[in-house]
Amino acid sequence: ESNSMAIRADRIESDIRAIAACTHTPGNGATRPTFSAEWARARDYVIAQATALNFEIRIDAFGHVHARPAEFASETNTHTKVWLCGSHIDTVPHGGDYDGVAGIVVALELLRSARDDGIVLPLELIIFAEEEGPTFGLGMLGARAWVGELSAERLSQLTNIDGQNYLEAGKPFGVDPTTFTSDRFVAHYLGLIELHIEQGPGMWRRDQQLAVVNSIAGRQQYKITLRGEANHAGATSMADRRDALACSAEIALMLETLAAEISGDAVCTIGRLSVLPNAINVIPDRVEFTIDFRAPHDDQLARGLSLIQTNIQTIATRRQIDCSVEVSESIPARPMNAKLVETFSSHLPLIMSGALHDSAVMAPHMPTVMLFVPSKDGISHNSAEFSRFDDIAAGASLIEKLVRRPTLEQLNLADQKHFVSVCGRFYEHSPWVAERAWEVRPFTSVRKMIEAMSRTVRDASPDEKMQLIQAHPDLVGKLARENKLTAESSHEQTSAGLTTLNVIEVEDFESFNAAYKDRFGFPFIICARMNKKDAILAAFPLRLRNSRDAEIQTALSEIDNIAMLRASDAIWESEE
């Protein structure tokens, strides 16, 4: 874990305010269409900050900005995987200052704080070129093109308000379809971490500072056309009407009920509505509208598709309305990487993202996770959007603990001093175990590393084994009461509930500790994180019946369990 004090909310605030100033609508929200002058100013601000820290800047063929420490320059250090962290800076018209931007400045602050601490961080900041969708009529274009979902031909068909297509508008900013193939995404990353504002009221209402996203909802979009019969509003009885608008109203109410039936997390929206002839005294004969249906699981999306089509047809038939249902878009649900979710969920609640993000595009291609910070009152895509800078900084600090973990690959290449600085804490106050195990690198897994360290202990002299056992503190002992435990031991005793004991339980521990030491001459050792206080108390009388030799072997086995958990916390093991 990091001991950094360098993550600073004031720098995060300064970055966000600087980017917020890059808007086409000052005083009326953030308006930064992709490849616009305002977008370029925001992008150039981030590039300038990264350049000042001696980071390598690379613009890929799709228009994304990549920044990483020069020591991890992609041309010279291709064998070393780094973390990817970032988001987007484009906005909807009159949008907020935090959507996307929070993720960019977190990545920048992680790189800055590492420099402050004299650490070269294996992390690459990314500004995804286009995410929101209004500029070219389709969202997440940059990420989709990067992973090969969108071709240059398709991008040439998508135009902005000035009539320029993505390739034309992006050309001054590095977009180059002739190098799409050679610049296509390759999974030379440990994973992607994107911090984002929630864009909903849930976390703010629950007063949650952070949450980990375990799934991004899939989306289906439909275009519905209803054809009835135009007729005189005064002369046509209610029984004789074929009113396309009344039919659409019944469909809208049906969709509200339908979403709730499919899932508590499913949502359904009619977003665009066109009524013809749109005259005050004419019964509408043609209505076109869109449906946006989202759900966290693909089976729910499939059920929604079937029910939406069936129910609309049923309503239209009963009302003698001709209808067509066209599926205009279908994006599957995107589960986040289970290992990354688990890493963060030990500290955070789980949440689903109803909004789509670049992470949804990238998740099938590399380990991906998102963290959410709350949006005040759930407001987003609005100039009133607000998230607390302290919450964003807390998210950065949590991400920092992960991205500063060395990888197994790095430790296999490390010199003995660096290896011991990381792994010497796995066996309590006994760095000699790591010093000797270093000589038998490389290790194919963290488990193999601990197995090697365990063999090192088994091969040690009886005196060395006993010194290792004696190095462990008593559970609920004097060192714990005086707050003198190692960080690892303190965390382990806390996780087992040993820091919230009542007076009687404390007396029980003291009594058992004394009896055990009197019998065996060394402290009682058990892997606290694999047990709770009741299980530990129950183990004392059972183990007091054992021989001394048996307890030495049991103690060493428990020490191996402790070391394995400590190693898993300290080292990031890549998924191949």
Image: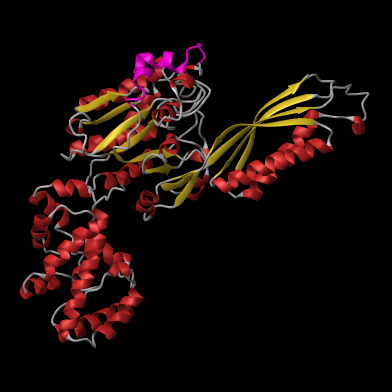
Colouring mode (rainbow / by chain / secondary structure / one colour):
secondary structure
Q: Which residue is rendered at x = 10% and y = 72% of the image?
A: 465
Give the percent coordinates (x, y) of residue 359: 42, 37
- Per the rendered image, the range of residues in magenta is 160-183
Give the percent coordinates (x, y) of residue 75: 20, 28
Q: Is residue 497 visible?
A: yes
In this rendering, the answer to whether 501 lies above or below 28 is: below
In this rendering, the answer to whether 27 lies above or below 77 is: above
536 to the left or right of 477 = right
Tell me, yes or no, whether the highlighted magenta stretch contains residue 487.
no
Nearer the observer, 226 or 497? 226
The quadrant where residue 190 appears = top left
84 to the left or right of 274 = left
Tell me, yes or no, whether the highlighted magenta stretch contains residue 172.
yes
The quadrant where residue 168 appears = top left
54 to the left or right of 177 = left
* Residue at the extreme bottom: 545
The quadrant where residue 16 appears = top left
